[in-house]
Amino acid sequence: MTLQNLILLATALFVIGLTGLLIRKTALGLFLAIEIMFNAANLLFVVFARMHQQTVGQAFVFIILAVAAAEAAVGISLTLAIMRRQGTLDIDEMKQLKW
Amino acid sequence: MTELPPLADIAFYLLAGMALATALAAVLHKSLVIAALNLVLMMLSLAGIFLLLAAPFLAALQVIVYSGAIMVLFIFAIMLLNAPEDRAGHKVSNGRKLGAAIAGLGFFAAIANGVLRNPTCAQSLRYWPVGSDNLGDPGVVSRVLLEQLAVPFEIVSLLLTVAMIGAVMLAKRNLAESPASAEPS
């Protein structure tokens, strides 16, 4: 288990999440992709906490976990409200804010 | 004489491969329910990697909060919104897929280039139980959280309260107008 492998694993996960963010068209699919990116960032925090023998990195992951939970709750209820109002989850049709 | 790699090495590569495969499936599968279930598997394998990296507390949190609470919320929303299929998925143009692949591969190549050239990154980390480090014990993490990071900790609790109230407000029916008369203009 070298540092290299772990960083490459986290980067690969982040890139997979990024690609998913770009190719999904359903709002809920985007949330799934964002969760993958959150997890990649968490993994990097834990890896570097291990490398430097510092617990602060792990405490940060705790905070990121809470932020991710808040993001999921607000994001899903936003999606629910948009679905009620417009009857669609396709992100290309959500362009009310586009000027 | 061939030597078997240590068991922990096998566990690490197995978990890493599983995380990558399930993440790919979560992004590419047409059915959102299957994608979400794959994401649960990815989070479980990351919890295993956290264990190897001396973070038992975070591994437990990952299982309880991520693959427990958050993913249940997601699956609930997918079922509730009746969106088990990425129906719009077939409309994604090839140019968009190509662009996403190029962006992803370029990003990965840029970071991998830097990581592979950096000699610091070649060091290997010991598996957790061997050195018996306690940097990830619940007591140690909580001490850092409540002493050094007390202010961010309180801000996060405020954020969670605000998010909860916001979620209830947003998801409430009949906020300003009845949903039937809401015309997208």
Image (cartoon, coloured by chain):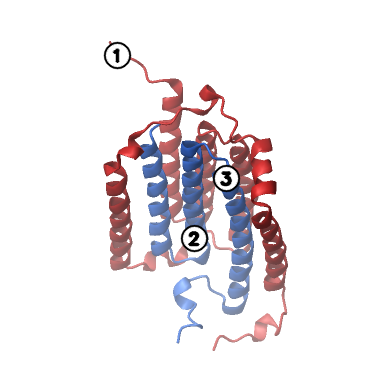
Chain colours: A blue, B red
Instruction: Mark 3 or mark 2: name the one nearer the start of the chain.
Output: 2
Q: Which mark is residue A29?
A: 2
Give the image quarter of residue A58.
Answer: top right
Q: Residues within 10 Å of mark 3 (few under 14, many from 20)?
A: many
What's the residue at 61%, 70% (across, down)? A78
The residue positioned farthest toward the bottom in the image shown: B185
**As shown in the figure, which amino acid type bears the numbered disc 3?**
Val
- The quadrant of the picture occupied by the N terminus of chain A is top left
Helix, strand or loop at label 3? It is helix
Residue at 34% from the left image edge and 38% from the top image edge? B120
Q: Quadrant of residue B28?
A: bottom left
Q: Which quadrant would the C terminus of chain A be assigned to in this image?
A: bottom left
Residue A63 location (% of width, % of height) = 61, 52
**Residue under pointer 3:** A56
Residue marked by disc 1:
B2
Measure the alpha-carbon separation of dots 3 and 1: 41 Å
Residue situated in front as seen by the camera: B27 or B10: B10
Closest to the observer: B73 or B145? B145
Subunit that carries the residue with mark 2: A
